[in-house]
Image (tube, grey):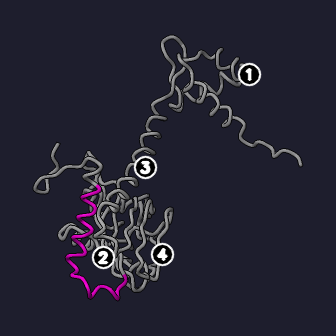
């Protein structure tokens, strides 16, 4: 069998350069990189120039190369996401009071929420959640909670980037389908402190959502507490919303967020 053609050789060479720079005890010179990786001189210099331009590498005063700040930003983002998911699961493990509910953790990406973590209850919901799943933010409790957590300016910017003409068709008859309805929903969420998905994602499925904040007070995710409509009668609606708020605050606390009397403290 013939070997598959490598369609991105430059990318592989760039990764080899990054690995070499990271492993070197001192910032290697262009000549060192060329020799150790057995690269044509023109290829090495071309790649190094582009990698410096993109912030993947930085050139030292001695003309050596070290890892660039752009990589540090990527690494930090990946670490923060892992920490977020880890602390979410740690909180669930330490609090069995949530076992009767399906609990989800999502992040807002554009007009969608992405599911980062979930723990399904034994109760049949009629819908299943899985890591990596995406849903329109305006139909979800966590998505609307995160939209409500924006400043007015940020929310206006989000609306400008995602006009109603681009909104998906509602998944159920209860789905939000106008800016007026969404703005009213956002106002209600801000007043009561949590969001409610009243069968907007799936008939017979309710979810209560609240926001997770990082150490700087920025909204980084949303937690959802879901249960079937048939189980609603066993609980007080306000108590379900408060449950989502408490869980979100507990995860936020684990991430370093502190507040007293509703105000962030250093």
**Where does residue 224 sit, x and y in percent of width and height?**
34, 68
Does 108 lie within the magenta span?
no
Q: Is mark 3 on a helix, strand or loop?
A: helix
- Alpha carbon separation for disc pair 3 and 4: 23 Å
Q: Mark 2 points at which residue?
A: 181
- Local crowd at mark 3 within 10 Å, few (<14), some, or many (≥20)? few
Magenta segment, which residues? 228-251
Pair 2/4: label in front: 4
- Residue at 64% of width from left, 28% of height from top? 47
State the residue in front, 246 or 190.
246
State the residue in front, 139 or 99.
99
The mark nearer the N terminus, 3 or 4, is: 3
Could you say which quadrant of the image residue 252 lies in?
bottom left
Could you say which quadrant of the image residue 30 lies in?
top right
Residue 209 relative to residue 21: left or right: left
Look at the picture and state if 265 lies above or below 234. above
- Mark 2 and mark 4 in contact? Answer it, CB < 8 Å: no
- Alpha carbon separation for disc pair 3 and 2: 35 Å
Labelled disc at residue 38: 1
- Alpha carbon separation for disc pair 1 and 3: 36 Å
Q: Is mark 1 on a helix, strand or loop?
A: loop
Look at the picture and state if 200 lies above or below 154. below
Q: Mark 4 points at which residue?
A: 128
- Residue at 34% of width from left, 76% of height from top? 100
Residue 194 relative to residue 45: left or right: left
């Amino acid at each position: 069998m013939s070997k598959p053609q490598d369609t991105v050789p430059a990318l592989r060479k760039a990764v080899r350069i990054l690995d070499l720079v990271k492993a070197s005890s001192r910032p290697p010179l262009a000549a060192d990189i060329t020799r150790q990786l057995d690269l044509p001189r023109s290829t090495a210099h071309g790649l190094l120039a582009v990698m410096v331009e993109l912030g993947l590498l930085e050139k030292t005063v001695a003309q050596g190369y070290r890892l660039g700040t752009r990589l540090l930003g990527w690494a930090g983002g990946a670490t923060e996401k892992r920490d977020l998911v880890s602390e979410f699961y740690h909180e669930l493990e330490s609090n069995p009071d949530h076992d009767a509910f399906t609990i989800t953790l999502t992040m807002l990406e554009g007009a969608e929420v992405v599911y980062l973590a979930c723990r399904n209850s034994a109760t049949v919901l009629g819908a299943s959640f899985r890591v990596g799943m995406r849903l329109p933010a305006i139909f979800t409790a966590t998505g609307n909670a995160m939209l409500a957590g924006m400043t007015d300016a940020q929310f206006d910017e989000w609306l400008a980037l995602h006009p109603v003409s681009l909104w998906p068709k509602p998944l159920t008859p209860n789905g939000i389908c106008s800016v007026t309805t969404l703005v009213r929903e956002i106002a209600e969420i801000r007043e009561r402190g949590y969001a409610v998905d009243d069968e907007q994602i799936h008939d017979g499925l309710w979810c209560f959502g609240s926001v997770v904040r990082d150490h700087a007070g920025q909204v980084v995710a949303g937690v959802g507490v879901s249960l079937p409509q048939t189980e609603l009668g066993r609980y007080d609606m306000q108590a379900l919303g408060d449950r989502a708020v408490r869980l979100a605050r507990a995860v936020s606390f684990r991430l370093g967020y502190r507040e007293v009397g509703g105000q962030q403290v250093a």
